[in-house]
Amino acid sequence: MPHVLVVEDDPNVRAALLRALRDHGYAASSAADGLTGLHGAVADRPDLVLLDLGLPDLDGLEVLRMIRAVSAVPVVVATARDDEAQIVRALDGGADDYLVKPFGAAQLDARIRAVLRRAAPDAGPAGPITIGDLVVDPPGRGATLGGTALELSAREFDLLCYLAERVGTVVSKRELLTEVWRQPYGGSDKTVDVHLSWLRRKLGETAAHPTYLHTVRGVGVRLDRPR
Amino acid sequence: MNGVRAQVNALVAATMAVVLVAFLVPLGLILRREAEQRAISTATLTAQATAALVVASGPEASGLLSAGRDADGVLTSVFLPDGTVLGAPARRTPSVELAARGRAFAADAGDGIEVLAPVQGQDGVAIVRAHVTEATLHRGVARTWALLGVLGLLLFGLGLLLADRLGRRLVDSVTTLAATAGRLADGDLAARAGLTGPRELRRVGVGLNRLADRIGELLDAERREVADLAHRLRTPATALRLDAESLRDADERARLLSDVDVLGREMDEVIRTARRPVREGARPHADLASVAADRVAFWSVLAEDTGRALDCALPAGPVPVRVAAEDLAAALDALLENVFTHTPDGTPLRVTVTALPDGGGRIVVEDGGAGFAAGAGARGTGLGLDIARRTAAAAGGHARFTRSPLGGAHVALDFSAPA
């Protein structure tokens, strides 16, 4: 049972998080401020730290930097600010992933599982994913088709990467909005559609004649090996 | 030369001209009068000396009299009682006759001034006439006037030069202030005015710099407030969502989560709206034509994949509008997304951008779908259309929702020109 340390100052959110984590099978403990959280991250040796950036005593990014100085524990940052600069600072500061408030228990669970999976000792380094002539390299943030590099925007790459990691599985547009766009409760299917259309162009296919990207009407989209 | 400098120069030129005319013209006249008086005095002295000579020497004085001008340019004649004229030839004028009655005087001779002095001799009254010509009378006056004129011109030129330097200094200070104000208006809040020039302009510069500091402080405060607003709203919303998800009753959970979703979307929009001033900076502006071209190009692939004819009419030149490019793109995306969401595949759509006559621009997004009336209330009150409406309103414009000639919805957003 993985142990998650929640560093969150708001008592209601903290209580709700502890309850949600326990319901999803985690051992959960909590700290109400940065210094207590830092002490807990070192002394209790949790499997993962869920760190709120808006803490009363220390800036969350400062706590993250201090944790990173003494521990390699995976850290998922929770922030109320969705501006890119703050998120980039958190990821550059050593966070393994981030969640923008408000988030639900399922999304929290999915993020924690993904981070723990990547942090597992036997996980090994993430390598390129090969699907027919398509090669997606998540660590290198690049993709090639038939040996030719694809020119993808950041969002298109995230979308392709997410689908490539679930090759053969139908992924709903809501899931894509939640996981790729980080908009679990907002956004529009058409936003996903237009990015899929661009991705199709770059993969050299059309919706009518798909090779890799297959739309499953009413369900979602699936990245599959060419037949 | 710019306006203020030209006005300063013109003012100084006019003032100097008046002062110089008021000073030099009377001076010139006085000098002319002085020259005349001097010549008349000389002629009078000459006449008196000649009279004394005539008294002392009698007719023998003729040998002592010159037939021409003396060194002072005075022509001296003596009319003897017997009618003989000694010295310079001269007619016996009525003035001479008047002087013969025993009066000494000076009179206008037509070609100058004559001074007449009677001398009582044994044979009667002899008249001494000292004549000063016009040329002698005003000798040196023209040269003096020329010197005064040159002096006046020099003073005038010097005055203009000083005025131009003063004007340039004044104008340079005002130009620097105007440039700083322009940079601030363009959103460069680091711009500060140099404190040079006259005291009043330095005070304006200090005021402008204080204003810039204040704007920067207000924007920083707003940025902090907005960041705090996101934290204050989203943190309890997280607790609310997690609590709603933990409800045992599935119906209640679904209903509450649906409400929380709506709340979350509205909250995002509130935060986004509150961030607008921070996002836009001091002077929001964008080119409606280029943003529209970019967004139409982005959505064109989906139009192609869904069998829609996407027609786009854009003006050749830029259409500057008072809204940040990011917000404008979000509003256009909302409108286009609305068409794709609420009309079936194959429905045509058209995007038209026009420049408004009084500045600013209009973008129209229309489609051949069922329109707002048949499209159910959701289309008319959707968050996307609200975003578009609010963006136009924030940019000093408005949104209109009508029916398109294509048969479906017609949404027109008007934006004001940048400030």
Image (cartoon, coloured by chain):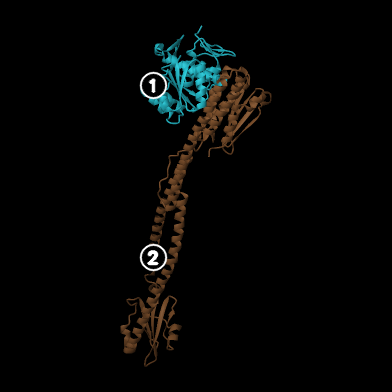
Chain ID of residue with mark 2? B
Indicate the amino acid at tag 1: Ala
What residue type is disc 2 on? Leu
- Identity of the residue drawn at 48% across and 13% down: A164
Question: In this orientation, which residue lies closer to the viewer: B403 or B399?
Answer: B399
Q: Mark 2 highlights which residue?
A: B148
Parent chain of label 1: A
Residue occupying image coordinates x 65% and y 22%: B369
Mark 2, secondary structure of its residue? helix
Q: Residue B182: x and y, percent?
A: 47, 42
Place of residue B390 in the rendered image (x, y in percent of width and height, measured from the top left): 58, 32
Nearer the observer, A12 or B113: A12
- Name the colour assigned to chain B in the rendering: brown
Q: In this figure, which residue is indicated by the disc labeled 1?
A: A43
Mark 2: few/some/many CA within 10 Å (<14, 14-19, 20+): some
Name the residue: 41% across, 17% down: A140
Give the quadrant of residue A123: top left
**Vertical arrangement, residue A19 with respect to residue B189, above or below:** above
State the hue of chain A.
cyan
For mark 1, give the secondary structure: helix
Is the C-beta separation of discs 1 and 2 under 8 Å? no
Q: Is residue B11 above or below residue A163?
A: below
In the picture, measured across the screen, residue B419 lies left or right of residue B88, that is right
Pair 1/2: label in front: 1
**In the rendered image, is residue B55 in sight?**
yes
Q: Residue at x 38, y 23 (%)?
A: A68
Q: Position of residue B405 (x, y in %)?
A: 66, 26
Give percent across and percent down for residue B355: 57, 34
Instruction: Give the CA distance from mark 1 to mark 2.
Output: 102 Å
